[in-house]
Image: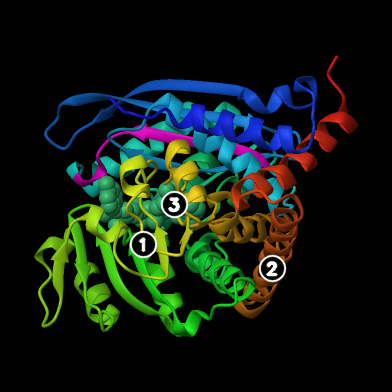
Amino acid sequence: MKDYNPYDNVISTIKKAADLLCLKENDYITTLYPERELKVSFPVKMDDGSVRIFEGFRVQHSSSRGPCKGGIRYHQDADIDEVKALAAWMTFKCAVVGLPFGGAKGAIKVDPAKLSRGELERLTRRYTAMILPIIGPEKDIPAPDVNTNADVMGWIMDSFSMLKGYAVPGVVTGKPLDIGGSLGRAEATGRGVTITTNEVLKKMGMRLDQATVAVQGMGNVGSTSAKLLRQAGAKVVAVSDVSGGLYQPEGLDLDSVFKYLSNRGNLLKDYQADGVSHISNEELLTCDVDVMVPAALENQITENIAAQIRAKMIVEGANGPTTVAADEILEKRGVIVVPDILANAGGVVVSYFEWVQNIQSLLWDEQEVNRTLNRIMIAAIDEVYDLHLEKQVTLRTAAYAVALRKLVRAKNIRGIFP
Ligand code: NAD
């Protein structure tokens, strides 16, 4: 049972942005409701011969600006409210960076660490068949999220293609390169986090190469963010995963941490090195750094934690890591929060490039991917930052307002069918 309903958080943020834009409820009411919610239950043959039933979801929040786009997560606590929130965040994320996509999200309620690779593959293939009627390159395009990766996307692409009778690389993004993945996609979210951190620090008169950083979560987003922030000159002093965190005031030896984590099943609680102390996730979130990057799950920064945060800036690598109540405390305390829909948009931007390459049968080189990502991210950061200064609102409200403006325009142009 979760203490916070993430979908309520989304609604309250949308309403704040609508107030800022002086919109009437009729203008934006469609953004408060997901367009389509699919719940599926399906059997999977387990290695011991037994059959288990799993529950999954796919929610399409909005297709106003284009096909729906959003990841698939495997997590034991996944539920429909979480998936609805994640789908809505995708709608606003795609709009804020100006991609021609709407938002969606999917999930299976499962702890994948408890499945064998064969069970994971059968689970993925059957889930793909169950959501097949509503996905496709022109309808809804999944991607990786928590506990899913390029291998899982490869199985989805293959299952979808087998059921259609021809290869459909554009049905998912974040695929392996050999079947139509894009160069730069694996690192894109962390790269976007790094670009955002650098740009916002500059606007605040600070420098990334003089900043100390803590990162919560050592998965795709957290580990790439830590790596690229360090490459840009920042000192990464704390990192964590689900088992706890590491702290070293002189800066962690990240290469050694990544090498240790590359063994499947290794957790940071068992990592040992000279000068490194073990801390809890709560201690990590409240440690004395310039920049905090929560890159694990939602609702990590609660009221309690917000009151103790010592970072000057929080860059939300994860989706929804800060509760609404915590956000208000951080605002009062003058902590700058760079919202998820902007900070972690790098992933969906490069997913868009992957989809464009797939449907046009084109190949971009990595430089072109990273250069275009940089341009799109900086333009979006500037637009959001300018509105934040002009209206004297938080970066979150400004980002939602920039996105909502575009969504309302699209809805007004298209009208209401029939
Ligand atoms: P991942 O599965 O690769 O990694 C998740 C990490 O979080 C792991 O290190 C795990 O140990 C850690 N973790 C899990 N529960 C935790 C807890 N309670 N406390 C501390 N750490 C915990 O997932 P990911 O793809 O890196 O996604 C992380 C976040 O970023 C999610 O919110 C996701 O929605 C968001 N996101 C991901 C992408 C992407 O491209 N993968 C894009 C945008 C946003």
Q: Is residue 264 visible?
A: no
**In the rendered structure, does residue 110 fall within the stretch colored magenta?**
yes
Q: Residue at x 74, y 60 (%)?
A: 386
Cβ atoms under marks 1 and 3 closer than 8 Å: no
The residue that label 3 is drawn on is 318
Residue 209: x and y, percent? 48, 84
Residue 122: x and y, percent? 32, 38
What amino acid type is highlighted by mark number 3? Ala
Q: Is residue 347 visible?
A: yes
Kindly tell me whether mark 3's CB lies below 8 Å from ligand 1: yes
Residue 23: x and y, percent? 79, 29
Q: Nearer the viewer, mark 1 or mark 3?
A: 1
What amino acid type is highlighted by mark number 1? Arg
**In the rendered structure, does residue 70 fall within the stretch colored magenta?**
no
The kind of secondary structure the magenta stretch mainly shows is strand
Cβ atoms under marks 1 and 2 closer than 8 Å: no
SS under mark 2: helix
Q: Residues within 10 Å of mark 2 (few under 14, many from 20)?
A: some
Residue 154: x and y, percent? 45, 52
Q: Looking at this view, is 97 or 235 the one in front?
A: 235
SS under mark 1: loop
What amino acid type is highlighted by mark number 2? Ile
Quadrant assignment for the C terminus = top right
* Disc assigned to residue 378: 2
Quick check: 247 above or below 240?
below
* The residue stretch that appears in magenta: 102-113
The residue that label 1 is drawn on is 310
